[in-house]
Amino acid sequence: MQPNTEFVTTTRMLYPEIFKSLESIRWNMADDVPWDTFDGSRLSDEQALTIKMNAITEWAALPATEMFLRDNQHDSDFSAFMSVWFYEEQKHSLVLIDYLRRFRPEFAPTPEELHAVRFAFDPAPPLETLMMHFCGEIRLNHWYRRAMQWHTEPVIRHIYNLISRDEARHGGAYLQYMKRALNTVGTSARAAFAKVGVLMASSGRSGKPLHPTSLHVNKSLFPNDTVQSKLPDPAWLERWLDEQILFDREWEQKVVTVILNNLSLLFGRKFESVKDLNRFRKEMTAV
């Protein structure tokens, strides 16, 4: 398959500036996590199991990075940014694993459980994938903020705060590449971003947690072709959201609002609802 070259750009690179920005505020596992404040009486087995599942899910940044590098061979700037994104996402997995190994080693994921989420993703249009992961970072930021509130043990609460902030910054980095795409390919970028935006902001109506880890990515493996399906307990994600951290309609609306507000700024047009965005999508499709 020939690489998609629709948004090769000769404009200035974004990676050097994004690298410096993220480097300047990067936290350190040894110095910025208050390990000595751990309170075992505030960590239940139920909570420890959710930390394990989050650690495995974060490990899936590995196949996602392989996908990004394969599908963006035409874009060395974005591919270079993957070095930062991959490092920080894998650190999320590592800090959660380290937490379990220190305090609940029986819940630490095995190498086999981690490797299970590494499988090939089918090639996909780079612009749509970019938008999907932008929305995914927004959603993860909110999921982890809610997880921080649900947990009672102080060290894991601190860790979830750290990684939730990272996810927000990653979303901001993806947004910079989205802005660049609008400047270089215009209408096709608008159409791609609006299409995926409608999908990712409609999870409240679908009743499913729409995130890259819950979407089908390999036709030959269907229906076991989501990261979620590769977890030791594939039903865990819905249970975590619905019964444990209680990611309810109010929190879901916060995600939708952030997506719509960012797209409003990106497109220079106010979107009050998913219906407004869908009307814009139809306009772009008709162009």
Image (cartoon, grey):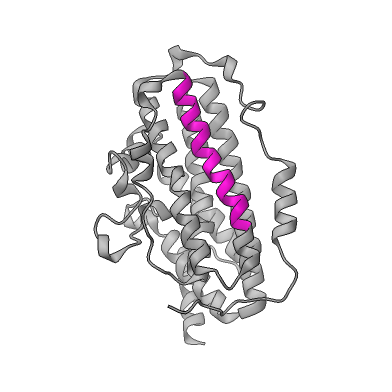
**Farthest residue in the left direction?**
223
Task: Give the image location of residue 188, x and y in percent.
Answer: 54, 80
Q: Nearer the viewer, residue 276 or 70?
A: 70
Picture residue at 52% right of the left edge, 70% below the top: 127
Q: Is residue 132 or residue 244 the one in the foreground?
A: 132
- Measured from the top left, where is residue 93 in percent x and y? 49, 38
Q: Quadrant of the N terminus?
A: bottom left
Name the side, left or right, on which 260 lies relative to 25.
Answer: left
Residue shown at 63% from the left, 67% from the top = 76
In-image side of 19 versus 185 (left or right): right
Does residue 220 appear left or right of residue 100 in this picture? left
112 in relation to 102, above or below: below
Residue stretch rendered in magenta on the structure? 81-102
Q: Locate residue 74, reporting x and y percent.
A: 58, 73
Residue 265 shows in the view: no
Identify the residue shown where x is 56% and y is 75%. 189
**47 in the magenta segment:** no
At 48% from the left and 58% from the top, the residue drawn is 66
Q: Is residue 93 above or below residue 36?
A: below
Judge whether residue 84 is colored magenta: yes
Q: Position of residue 200 (x, y in %)?
A: 44, 60
Q: Which residue appears farthest toward the front when viewing the image? A: 111
Q: Count the numbered circles shown.
A: 0
Residue 28 visible in the current orientation: yes
Q: Main secondary structure of the magenta part?
A: helix
* Image side of residue 148 versus residue 20, left or right: left
Closest to the observer: 285 or 251? 285
